[in-house]
Image (tube, coloured by chain):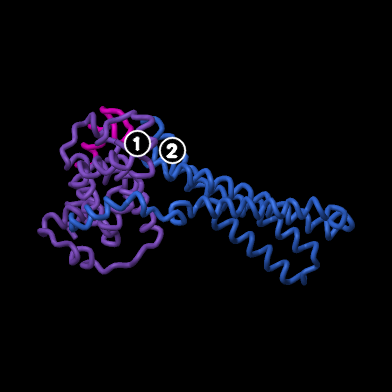
Amino acid sequence: MNLENLQKFSANIPQRIPWLKRYKNGLSGVLCVVISLLLIITILLHSSYFLSSFNNLMKMAIVAIIALYCLVKGVFTIIFQFKENEYYLSVNQYFIIGLYNKLYFVYEKLCWLYFLGPILLLFCVFVRIPSFILILLFLFYFVVLLLFSPRLVKHRNQIKNEISLKKNK
Amino acid sequence: MDKRESFLRLMEEKKKQIVKICNYYSSLYSQISAEDLFQDILMALWCSFPKFVKRHDCKISTYVYRVAHNVSISQCRKIKDKTVSLNEGDVLIERDTPQELSILYDLIGKLSQEEQVLVYLYLDEKSHNEIAEILGISVTNVGTKIQRVKKKLKLLNKKNNDE
């Protein structure tokens, strides 16, 4: 590594921080929150339409779930943005933040598997999809459930153990 | 003296220390460029500098070590996410180091990230107290971990030789 180049760079560094690069995660988090707010406003403004029939009510339920999902994802992403930039923390604490981030993604997958997946399947029942496609979808869901559920639970337990170990040091 | 000036003075003092860390990680991970890592570390130091001045809960060298290692760890994570398949010799070819050192780097590369940081600090001849402060663990734990890592490296070396 050329130290002279680094010297030049270190002299310029205070002006050279790319704002977009630094807050990439935070911006995507804000975007998620904005989308969720827009969806919530849409539901509130058109509540009479959504409540007019059972099918519309189901549509509202799906939109509400997507809004809630976006809101949670957005808030967690913003929190992670702040935490991720806390480089001055001890290495152990920084590892714990990384592990919490991993844990979040495992919970997100579990949420899709146990909650959002079945709800989407239920939605398919109400929109009158041909029965053979519906059966295939159910079969696919059960295969995915059987395949990934134990793995995800195991992964979650591993991460939780690791976090508690690191916290006790 | 304003913030910018005191920061640059600090960088001037600690530049070699940061360069050493950058070279260490670029030797462990061929995908990491030492110069890019150096820039990222400087950025992180600059961004967290006001907080350090405000809190001042550790020595300057500890602060620099913490930031440098944490940034390197996050870079390594990004690389692990985008795994690139390499031929066995690729990593060694890029390193302009003696063979024994290359073998050592390969062995260290097989350790966990936390162990890699520990090995670096140990090889840098830091005291157990300093290592404990940088890592945020107890001093007794540092001793135990160093012993474990030594044993692990010996085992890995033995496995490598057998293969």
Q: Position of residue A109 (x, y in %)?
A: 56, 53
Position of the C terminus of chain B, as image quadrant, is bottom left
The stretch of residues the image draws in magenta is B133-150
Q: Position of residue B45 (x, y in %)?
A: 33, 44
Task: Name the foreground residue: A129 vs B35.
Answer: B35
> CA separation, marks 1 and 2?
15 Å
State the hue of chain B.
Answer: purple
Q: Which residue is mark 1?
A: A90
Residue at 88%, 58% in the rendered image? A53
Amino acid identity at mark 2: Ile
Q: Are marks 1 and 2 on the same chain?
A: yes
The mark total stands at: 2
Residue at 56%, 51% in the rendered image? A29
Q: Is residue A160 magenta?
A: no
Q: Nearer the viewer, mark 1 or mark 2?
A: 1
Q: Which is more N-terminal, label 2 or label 1?
A: 1
Amino acid identity at mark 1: Ser
Residue at 25%, 34% in the rendered image? B131
In the visual, does B71 lie left or right of A52? left
Q: Position of residue A62 (x, y in %)?
A: 73, 56
Mark 1 lies on a secondary structure that is loop
In the visual, does A96 lie left or right of A153? left
Residue at 64%, 61% in the rendered image? A141
Question: Main SS type for the magenta part?
Answer: helix
A113 over A140 or under it: above or below = above
The blue-tinted chain is A
Q: Position of residue B18 (x, y in %)?
A: 23, 47
- Label placed on residue A163: 2
B57 over B31 or under it: above or below = above
Q: Chain of mark 1?
A: A
Classed neighbour count for the residue bearing mark 1: other residues with Cα under 10 Å, few (<14), some (14–19), many (≥20): many
A86 over B127 or under it: above or below = below
